Image (spheres, helix red, strand yellow):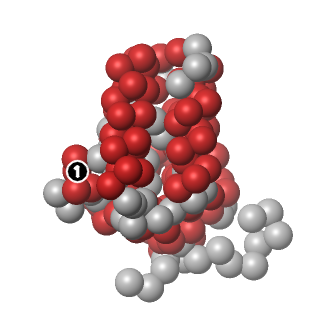
Amino acid sequence: MAKLTIEEVNRMDYEAFVQTFGNVVEHGTIISAAIWKFRPFDNVKHLHDTICDFIALLPTSGKEGILRCHPDLAGRLAQMNKLTEESTTEQKSAGLDQLSKEELDFLNAANSKYRSKFNFPFVICARENKKTAIFEGLRSRVSNSPEIELQRGIEEVKKICYYRLLDLIQMGVDPKL
């Protein structure tokens, strides 16, 4: 699919916008539905900032809900080939589709420990990390407080969202980008 221009994004009707941007935040159609009214967007950064501002205004339960919509890294859904197209591509880019049995066992145990402590899955921007960094993140971040980890997870969601927007929209030549 050809990337959209920001002008095409701004001309989208509600249904097309929600359909197109409903997964820039994993399973976040409600977010794209809520921000549609803020068109026109100046550029990709403006659209991303609008999404981030919406997320920032959510109560803790809403932010936790966003994190809960993310799959475990190389988890059950990945093993069953039931990830979203975006998550499949991202996990593959980090090498999570090429794990040894020992690595997969570690990841499953670490994901379980993390989820048990925080009641949401470990979220990290896979496009910015390879499996060793992801493993280290799981090892170290599980010792964070729930408040810190909620904030870290949401910051990772924002990074993921930005990359997903870049997959969909042309950057253009606007120096504000």
Q: Residue sitting at 22 percent across and 56 percent down? A: 79
Residue 159, above or below 30: below
> Identity of the amino acid at label 1?
Leu
Q: From this viewpoint, is residue 162 visible?
A: no
Instruction: State the residue lying farthest toward the right.
Output: 175
Task: Report which quarter residue 7 is drawn in.
Answer: bottom right
x and y percentages locating residue 92 in the rendered image: 42, 67
Residue 165, above or below 125: below
Total marks placed: 1
Between 29 and 17, the residue placed more toward the observer is: 29
Relative to 36, is 50 on the left or the right? right
Relative to 131, is 83 on the left or the right? left
Instruction: State the residue lying farthest toward the left.
Output: 80
Q: From this viewpoint, is residue 114 visible?
A: yes
Q: Residue sitting at 68 percent across and 78 percent down? A: 172
Residue bearing the label numbered 1: 77
x and y percentages locating residue 120 in the rendered image: 38, 27
Instruction: State the residue lying farthest toward the bottom.
Output: 2
Residue 136, above or below 21: above
Q: Residue sitting at 39 percent across and 67 percent down? A: 98
Mark 1 element type: helix
x and y percentages locating residue 53 in the rendered image: 60, 36
Residue 53, above or below 87: above
x and y percentages locating residue 91 in the rendered image: 42, 60
Task: Report which quarter residue 20 is drawn in.
Answer: bottom left
Q: Residue sitting at 65 percent across and 54 percent down? A: 46
On-image quarter of the N terminus: bottom left
On-image quarter of the C terminus: bottom right
Relative to 115, is 78 on the left or the right? left
